[in-house]
Amino acid sequence: MTTAVVLEKDRPYLILWRDNFDGDVAIKLYDGEKLVQNISDSTASDGIFEWTPYIPLKKGYSVRISQKDRKIFGQL
């Protein structure tokens, strides 16, 4: 069973992931296929990023971690 978590605006959260990327990654917020926000254009692929949303988040949003300049990504 998967439980959806709705994040609150102006509260810090940790985005955690595991990957096998060999360089920096981009972290982006999507509503379906529509980009809502660039969370980070480039950050180390170390599996952790602290993020404080500055906009209200809706049910159904997803976070994508992708290798910069490649179409390889994972979605949370």
Image: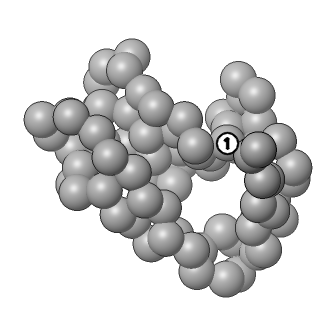
Q: Along the horizontal axis of the image, is 15 left or right of 45?
A: right
Residue at 54%, 35% (x, y): give it. Answer: 75
Residue, far left = 22
Q: Residue lying farthest right?
A: 59
Residue 64, image x and y in percent? 52, 38
Find residue 16 and report its image quarter.
bottom left
- Image position, residue 52 (x, y; %): 59, 74
Instruction: Indicate whether 68 appears above or below 70.
Output: below
Query: Could you say whether the residue bearing mark 1 is in a helix, strand or loop?
Result: strand
Q: Is residue 64 above or below residue 39?
A: above
At a point 22% along the width and 57% down the height, the residue shown is 46
Side of 76 where 43 appears, left or right: left
Q: Which residue sits at x=38%, y=33%?
A: 66
Taking the spot 28% from the left edge, 39% from the top edge, the residue there is 19
Q: Quadrant of residue 49?
A: bottom left
Quadrant position of the C terminus in the picture: top right
Residue for badge 1: 62
Residues packed near mark 1 inside 10 Å, few (<14), some (14 to 19) or many (20 plus): some
Give the percent coordinates (x, y) of residue 44: 21, 54
Q: Is residue 63 visible?
A: yes
How many circles with numbers are drawn on the protein? 1
Q: Position of residue 42 (x, y in %)?
A: 30, 49
Q: Quadrant of the N terminus?
A: top right
Above or below, comparing residue 8 to residue 65 in the picture: below
- 54 sits left or right of 70 in the view: right
Q: Give the image's coloring scheme.
A: one colour
Q: Do we see residue 41 in this rendering? A: no
37 with respect to 42 (left or right): right
Q: Which residue type does callout 1 highlight?
A: Ser
Given the current orientation, which residue lies at the most extreme bottom position? Answer: 11
